[in-house]
């Protein structure tokens, strides 16, 4: 790879990161072609979903590259090949408008997303069941909501061939409504949903409060789909009642089925995910200490974790690395992850929690069962498991407890912070202080 090819590849990588399109990289092949010292960027999408997303930003990407490379860059060729070209042995039956990477088979299940996964599987097997309609998936950015929403669509498409699946975003709904109203034909707007059996709407938090007429039509559409027993799946970064762009009557309806909160993954889950991703995607292998290090410093959202893995793999190829080490991770991701200049120990956590509760560390290690000490001990165990690279047994040893007690304490606090916002904020403050040193 010559310098210009490397420059263009890096510009593409930076653009995807800036525009939050890292998750598309697994659906796109990037190739820079050199012809008589002129360069063409070939982007090949393996699904119509990826092609559609790329098409919306391709002009901006082209302008960005031309600005940095000048006349040597000719432009971008966007190509497409069908999902059916994938390995036949897997017998994949995928909906062409959905992300081919987002299936139940490659969704990594752990404690933080197990409930969301189980509910999604149940709905995919029995779409339209009144108790599970609508399904509302919410949680932080990039932690699997879109993956599960797409997976539900793929599963129903495979097991219920006759059902029509519609996947969209609020922006697409609004654009569609504007198109029909300009032609004075709102009847046609509703007609496009007449045969829909599964309605999937992603990024619901982007619904603007300025779209009053669109939200009215969306409200009517919701009622029609629900009344006819059509399965609805919504994904959002916000809880229904926090969606400022929607009227209260619609927020209430969004909550009338089942609402599932997807929590952030812990360090152990990140390790499992990184190892599986490297294996499944045939990435350049990593040393164990590199995986351990990255898992401790990786962002909480899976989308960014994938983006970083793709970034490391790209630069490892450029550098002709046979295996990725800890120093390689630090160097390549120095601008993308926060690396604390100190290691946090179980002892550090014990001291921080003891200070927050105005007690002594020896109290946390004692047999005392006073409510405040017991709660502080549980919180200390919880934080240790969250941010310290130690096993349940190692944590238990410090607090003079067995590993099963630590597991119970962790699960107890994990449950409490879902209901107790004040407790959640206090734990976040302790963790922030520890990371600052």
Image (cartoon, rainbow, N blue to C red):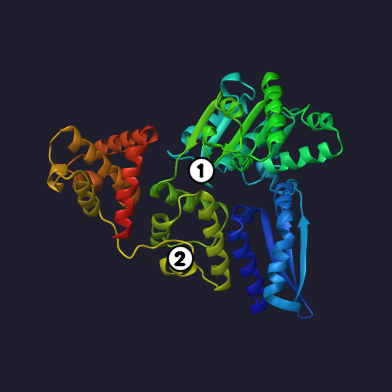
Q: In the figure, residue 65 lies in which quadrant?
A: bottom right
Q: Which residue is mark 2?
A: 329
Residue lying at 35% horizontally and 62% vertically, measured from the top left: 340
Picture residue at 42% right of the left edge, 59% below the top? 294
Query: Which structural element holds mark 1?
Result: loop
Provide residue 274's location: percent of width, then percent of height: 48, 53
Horizontal arrangement in the rendering, residue 83 relative to residue 117 (left or right): right
Q: Quadrant of the N terminus?
A: bottom right
Q: Residue at x 50, y 44 (%)?
A: 140
Q: Is residue 2 visible?
A: no
Density class for disc 1 (Cα within 10 Å; few <14, some 14-19, many ≥20) is some
Q: Which numbered disc flags the more N-terminal residue, 1 or 2? A: 1
Left-right relation of 219 to 205: right
Q: Which mark is residue 145?
A: none
Front one among 349 and 399: 349
* Residue matched to label 1: 108
Label 2 Cα crowd, 10 Å radius (few <14 / some 14-19 / many 20+): many
Q: Position of residue 333 (x, y in %)?
A: 48, 65
* Tag 2 secondary structure: helix
Quarter of the rendering containing residue 19 = bottom right
Is 412 drawn above or below residue 90 in the view shown?
above
Q: Position of residue 405 (x, y in %)?
A: 24, 36
Say if residue 361 shows up in the picture. yes
Residue sitting at x 66%, y 71%: 8
Q: In front: 413, or 332? A: 413
In the orientation shown, which residue stands out farthest toward the bottom? Answer: 37
Q: Looking at the figure, which quarter contains the C terminus?
A: bottom left
Q: Where is 255 relative to 43, above or below?
A: above
Q: Between marks 1 and 2, how big is the CA–CA gap?
A: 23 Å
Q: Is residue 139 left or right of residue 226?
A: left
């Amino acid at each position: 790879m010559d310098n210009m090819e490397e420059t263009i590849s890096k510009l593409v990588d930076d653009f995807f990161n800036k525009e939050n399109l890292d998750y598309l990289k697994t659906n796109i092949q990037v190739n820079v072609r050199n012809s008589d010292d002129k360069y063409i960027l070939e982007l090949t999408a393996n699904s119509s979903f990826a092609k559609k997303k790329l098409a919306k930003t391709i002009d901006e990407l082209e302008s960005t590259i031309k600005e940095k490379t000048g006349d040597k860059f000719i432009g971008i060729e966007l190509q497409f090949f069908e999902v059916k070209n994938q390995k036949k042995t897997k017998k994949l039956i995928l909906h062409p408008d959905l992300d081919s990477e987002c299936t139940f088979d490659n969704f990594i299940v752990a404690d933080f997303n197990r409930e969301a996964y189980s509910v999604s599987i149940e709905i995919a097997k029995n779409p339209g069941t009144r108790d599970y309609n609508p399904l509302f998936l919410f949680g932080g950015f990039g932690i699997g909501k879109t993956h599960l929403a797409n997976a539900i669509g793929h599963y129903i498409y495979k097991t219920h061939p006759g059902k029509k699946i519609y996947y969209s975003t609020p922006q697409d709904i609004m654009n569609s409504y504007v198109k029909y109203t300009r032609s004075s034909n709102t009847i046609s707007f509703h007609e496009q949903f007449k045969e829909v059996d599964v309605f999937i709407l992603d990024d619901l938090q982007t619904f603007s409060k300025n779209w009053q007429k669109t939200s009215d039509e969306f409200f009517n559409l919701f009622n029609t789909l629900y009344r006819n027993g059509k399965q609805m799946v919504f994904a959002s970064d916000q809880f229904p009642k926090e969606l400022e762009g929607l009227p209260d009557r619609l927020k209430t309806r969004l909550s009338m089925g089942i609402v599932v909160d997807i929590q952030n993954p812990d360090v152990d889950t990140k390790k499992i995910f990184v190892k599986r991703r490297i294996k499944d995607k045939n990435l350049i292998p990593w040393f164990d200490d590199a995986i351990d290090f990255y898992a401790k410093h990786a962002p909480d959202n899976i989308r960014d974790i994938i983006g970083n893995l793709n970034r490391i793999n790209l630069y490892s190829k450029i550098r002709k690395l046979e295996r990725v080490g800890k120093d390689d991770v630090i160097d390549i991701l120095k601008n993308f992850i926060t690396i604390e200049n100190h290691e946090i120990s179980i002892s550090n956590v014990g001291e921080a929690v003891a200070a927050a509760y105005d007690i002594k560390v020896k109290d946390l290690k004692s047999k005392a069962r006073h409510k405040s000490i017991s709660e502080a001990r549980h919180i200390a165990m919880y934080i240790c498991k969250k941010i310290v690279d130690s096993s349940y047994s190692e944590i238990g040893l410090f607090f003079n407890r067995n590993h099963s007690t630590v597991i119970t304490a962790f699960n107890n606090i994990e449950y409490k912070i879902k209901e107790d916002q004040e407790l959640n904020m206090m734990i976040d403050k302790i963790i922030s202080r520890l990371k600052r040193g």
